[in-house]
Image: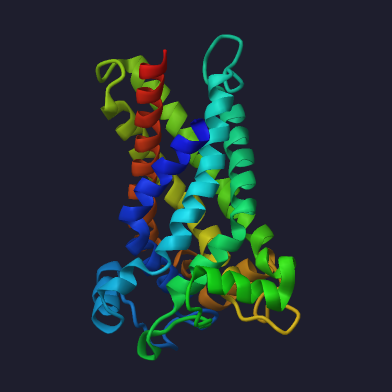
Amino acid sequence: MDFLMSGLAACGACLFTNPLEVVKTRMQLQGELQAPGTYRRHYRNVFHAFITIGKVDGLAALQKGLAPALLYQFLMNGIRLGTYGLAEAGGCLHTAEGTLSPVRSAAAGALAGVMGAYLGSPIYMVKTHLQAQAATEIAVGHQYNHQGMFQALIKIGQKHGLVGLWRGALGGLPRVIVGSSTQLCTFSSTKDLVTQQEIFPPHSWKVALVAAMVSGIVVVLAMTPFDVVSTRLYNQPTDAQGKGLMYRGLLDALLQTARIEGIWGMYKGIGASYFRLGPHTILSLFFWDQLRTLYYMYTK
């Protein structure tokens, strides 16, 4: 039940934030490995990107990749939040004195995140491909032109096998380790602190909301550079053997991006990342906490 509630909470958040994920993906691919000022900026900022995509690709394009996004959120966060919830309920995250251990909390969050992200990696790759697809006049990054999630998975599997389906998975893990450990650690710590200070009534939904807001800010700052290179590793073109043609791996992608695009290249799309990760973190953790509260309230 913990896994089911966690997956449903993440899917609920995804329905609201997927358009921001589309914008984020395109802004991260814009000007890939090109020096600032040498390419045309189709998307000047988050709001301009929304207008441009809606005008050129149509409003429906703002929900591109929704099916794999929902499936990925259910798999990844069902495993991640469910595993973390079980560890928390089992007392594994607290010291002998009963206080939350930040080290244990961060380690549990990172481990749970890695498990979920690795299993859901093929779905995330296809989601990235679909969200990057655009009309020629506003296209950025490599264009795969998939017809849908299942067609894309079958096509990649037939062409490159299981290895091809998990291409970029290892490069995407640092993004999840940093994001998941930061998110769950700061959420639990802030929630404990707010509860101890008795700022809100016991079991108030406002406690979870405040904790999720604080967590969202920290996650965006820590995770964006890894998110940028993860998007690029998944979306890069490949040769006949399924090997990436632009980057050899995570470190190569980080170094190339920093060298050619500068330090700000590592934070491309940070506005979209904030508007997406902030609400997604708030909504998913808030839904997760409320679902768990309701479940335990009516089953005990």
Q: Is residue 92 left or right of residue 128?
A: right
Q: Position of residue 144 (x, y in %)?
A: 53, 81
Rendered view: 108 above or below 230: above
Of 148 and 42, nearer the camera is 148
Q: Is residue 192 left or right of residue 77?
A: left
Rendered view: 286 above or below 14: above
Q: Position of residue 81 (x, y in %)?
A: 51, 37
Indicate the quadrant containing the C terminus: top left, top right, bottom left or bottom right: top left
Which color scheme is applied?
A: rainbow
Specify the quadrant of the image occupied by residue 112. top right
Q: Does the rendering let one see residue 181?
A: no
Residue furthest to the right in view is 241
Q: Residue at x 41, y 72 (%)?
A: 27
Callout count? 0
Q: Is residue 53 left or right of residue 264?
A: left
Q: Does the rendering let one see residue 238?
A: yes
Q: Is residue 290 left or right of residue 264?
A: left
Specify the quadrant of the image occupied by residue 169. bottom right
Q: Position of residue 12 (x, y in %)?
A: 35, 47
Q: Residue at x 36, y 90 (%)?
A: 137
Of 79 and 47, nearer the camera is 79
Of 238 and 233, nearer the camera is 238
Of 175 and 130, nearer the camera is 130
Rendered view: 258 above or below 110: below
Q: Residue at x 40, y 38 (%)?
A: 285
Residue furthest to the top in view is 97
Q: Position of residue 117 (x, y in %)?
A: 59, 51
Q: Residue at x 47, y 51 (%)?
A: 73
